[in-house]
Image (spheres, rainbow, N blue to C red):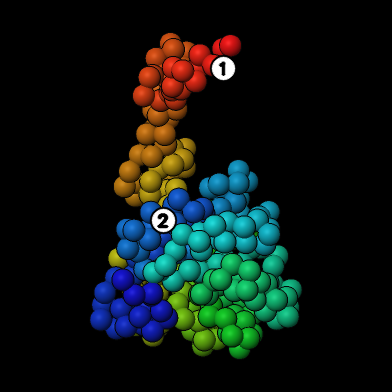
């Protein structure tokens, strides 16, 4: 397969071919999503809760995300790789935003970066794009600023809030973003905004009319079984399978069923004889 480019994503949008985006945070999952043939891979700051044990995405650092992003990069050939700018790494100024975006490109070979929000974030996006890095926007439920949004809840559920989502989308498109993530937005609001956008929109809990869908790998595989947002369909039960495996291992060690002869090295009898002498 050919490497997915920004041009390819625009073509897919024009042809009405759904874009498949997914998160990954390490090398084995990068190999899996590569082999599965997805179009876009995001090393989301959701690594904070999915692999680093934080309760939300606010504390995760650039250094932590860069380490994970490099691991994913080593496993990818085909999909577009998007790095996720963490909270506090781009809001202060255009200079800060550009410097952070450049780190994701230079130190982790990202093809693009993503940041959250409209308004001031659209200005940051414009600056990053002018500095040579493609930007994906992200509006609706923006977890980095969830406190200001009243928690983790759907956005755009009143006329005024829907207008806010619409304005943010237009501002990001105007800034030059190549794509925008719509998170947790009523399907009808998405439907109403879509005709005004000329760039691919990737939805997560934003209904069926977007140009593509994104899900968090750990949600769709149920690697965590204690967190299930409304929009996260489970396509596999990986935590159950992992637990089964580790329990079976522990049981066989305790009953001395493992290791069996086929897991055990041998030595030639004469060598053993000499060793014993
Ligand atoms: O960090 C993340 O996983 C994301 C996606 C949900 C878009 O930002
Ligand atoms: Na994110």
Q: Secondary structure at mark 2?
A: helix
For label 2, being within 8 Å of ligand 1 is answered no
Residue 88 locus on image (x, y percent): 70, 65
Q: Which mark is residue 31?
A: 2
Q: Is residue 212 above or below residue 119?
A: above
Residue 69 seen from this side: yes
Tell me what residue is drawn at x 52 percent, y 75 percent: 112
Quadrant in the picture for residue 276: top right
Residue 70 locus on image (x, y percent): 57, 61
Q: Is residue 6 left or right of residue 125?
A: left
Q: Is residue 197 above or below residue 72?
A: below
Tell me what residue is drawn at x 51 percent, y 14 percent: 273
Of the pair 211 and 218, the residue shown nearer to us: 218
Residue 45 locus on image (x, y percent): 57, 58
* Figure quadrant of the N terminus: bottom left
| Front disc: 1 or 2 | 1
Please name the residue that numbered disc 1 is placed on. Answer: 275
Total numbered labels:
2
Q: Is residue 50 above or below residue 75?
A: above
Q: Are marks 1 and 2 in contact (CB under 8 Å)?
A: no
Residue 3 locus on image (x, y percent): 38, 74
């Amino acid at each position: 397969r050919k490497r997915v480019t920004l041009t390819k994503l625009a073509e897919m949008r024009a042809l009405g071919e759904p874009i498949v985006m997914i998160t990954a945070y390490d090398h084995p999952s990068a190999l899996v999503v590569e082999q599965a043939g997805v179009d876009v891979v995001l090393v989301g700051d959701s690594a904070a809760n999915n692999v680093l044990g934080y309760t939300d995405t606010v504390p995760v650092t650039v250094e932590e995300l860069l380490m994970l992003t490099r691991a994913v990069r080593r496993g990818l050939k085909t999909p577009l790789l998007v790095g996720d700018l963490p909270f506090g790494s781009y809001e202060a100024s255009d200079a800060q935003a550009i410097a952070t975006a450049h780190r994701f490109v230079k130190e982790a070979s990202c093809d693009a970066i993503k940041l959250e929000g409209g308004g001031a974030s659209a200005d940051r996006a414009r600056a990053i794009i002018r500095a040579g890095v493609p930007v994906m926007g992200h509006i609706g439920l923006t977890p980095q600023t969830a406190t200001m949004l009243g928690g983790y809840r759907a956005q755009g559920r009143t006329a005024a809030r829907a207008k806010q989502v619409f304005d943010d989308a237009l501002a990001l498109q105007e800034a030059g973003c190549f794509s925008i993530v719509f998170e947790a937005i009523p399907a009808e609001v998405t439907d109403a905004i879509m005709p005004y956008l000329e760039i691919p929109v990737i939805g997560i809990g934003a209904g069926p009319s977007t140009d593509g869908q994104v899900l968090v790998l750990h949600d769709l595989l149920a690697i965590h079984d204690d967190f299930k947002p409304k929009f996260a369909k489970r396509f596999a039960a990986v935590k159950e399978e992992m637990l089964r495996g580790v329990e079976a291992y522990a049981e066989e060690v305790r009953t001395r069923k493992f290791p069996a002869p086929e897991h055990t090295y041998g030595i030639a009898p004469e060598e053993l004889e000499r060793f014993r002498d």
